[in-house]
Image: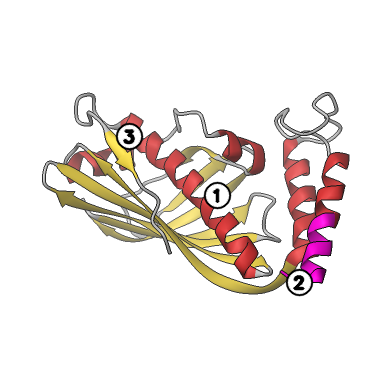
């Protein structure tokens, strides 16, 4: 990383203490002069101004194994609306995170409203191949991070693996931050955190007894 990138990173870190706390996790926990949504927008707006550049198309995938049939996993994906699990610390501290979804996930062309802590996404279903594949595009993103990352679409792929099922959650997005060698690993790490939170919510929505345990592994690349 060159001198200019180092200088911009130093400037960003120097500005961080002046921002109010987000969810009580910032440096000045007693000062909340702005809402969480405003803090997110200011923080990511600053990052975008310091490191913004030409957009880069990116893909992140996270595979998870459930001890359940593809049909049970598919039903869990369709049924879960409220995300019942607490998001990990870094996700709570740094990004808006999903709390519920609304809409018909079984119909091509249907729109899905995804409510986040601090914003929302609107998705449109593109492909439905029950019980193995669902693909969507993102019509609207309002999360306060648009100067850094814009989600384009994604998919859920479910396949049978003996007594288990493997589900792969994929997100396609545009990364605006430079240098990519610095920011791509950060974006991928946070995307995996988000994926695991969503998939944990799906696991909690499975019918009782259909999932005795699961293991998650973040894919590289």
Say which residue label 2 marks: 2
- The tag on residue 203 is 3
Q: Residue at x 85, y 28 (%)?
A: 31
Say which residue label 1 marks: 190
Q: CA distance from mark 1 to mark 2?
A: 24 Å
Q: CA distance from mark 3 to mark 1?
A: 20 Å
- Decide whether residue 3 is among the magenta residues: yes
- Mark 3 neighbour class, 10 Å CA radius: few under 14, some 14 to 19, many 20 or more: many
Nearer the camera: disc 3 or disc 2: 2
Numbered disc total = 3
Label 2: which secondary element = loop
Question: Where are the magenta residues, as a range?
Answer: 1-10
On screen, residue 136 versus residue 146, left or right, reads left
- Mark 1 neighbour class, 10 Å CA radius: few under 14, some 14 to 19, many 20 or more: some
On screen, residue 79 versus residue 100, left or right, reads left
- Decide whether residue 65 is among the magenta residues: no
Q: Nearer the viewer, residue 181 or 203?
A: 181
Quarter that holds the N terminus: bottom right
- Residue 94: x and y in percent read 65, 42
């Amino acid at each position: 990383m060159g001198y200019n990138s180092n200088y911009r990173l130093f400037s960003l870190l120097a500005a961080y203490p002046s921002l109010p706390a987000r969810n009580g996790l910032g440096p000045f926990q007693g000062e909340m002069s702005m809402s969480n949504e405003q803090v997110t927008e200011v923080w990511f707006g600053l990052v975008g101004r310091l490191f913004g550049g030409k957009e880069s198309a990116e893909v992140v995938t996270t595979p998870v194994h459930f001890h359940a049939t593809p049909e049970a996993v598919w039903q869990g994906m369709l049924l879960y609306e409220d995300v019942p699990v607490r998001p990990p610390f870094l996700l709570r501290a740094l990004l808006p995170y999903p709390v519920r979804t609304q809409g018909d996930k079984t119909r091509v062309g249907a729109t899905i409203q995804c409510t986040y802590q601090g914003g929302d996404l609107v998705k449109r279903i593109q492909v439905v191949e029950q019980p193995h594949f669902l693909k969507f595009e993102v019509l609207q993103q309002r999360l306060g991070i648009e100067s850094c990352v814009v989600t384009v679409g994604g998919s859920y792929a479910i396949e049978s693996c003996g007594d288990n099922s493997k589900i792969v959650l994929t997100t396609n997005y545009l990364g605006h931050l430079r240098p990519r060698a610095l920011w791509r690993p950060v974006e991928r790490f946070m995307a995996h955190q988000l994926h695991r939170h969503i998939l944990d919510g799906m696991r909690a929505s499975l019918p009782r007894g259909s999932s005795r345990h699961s293991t998650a592994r973040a894919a590289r690349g």
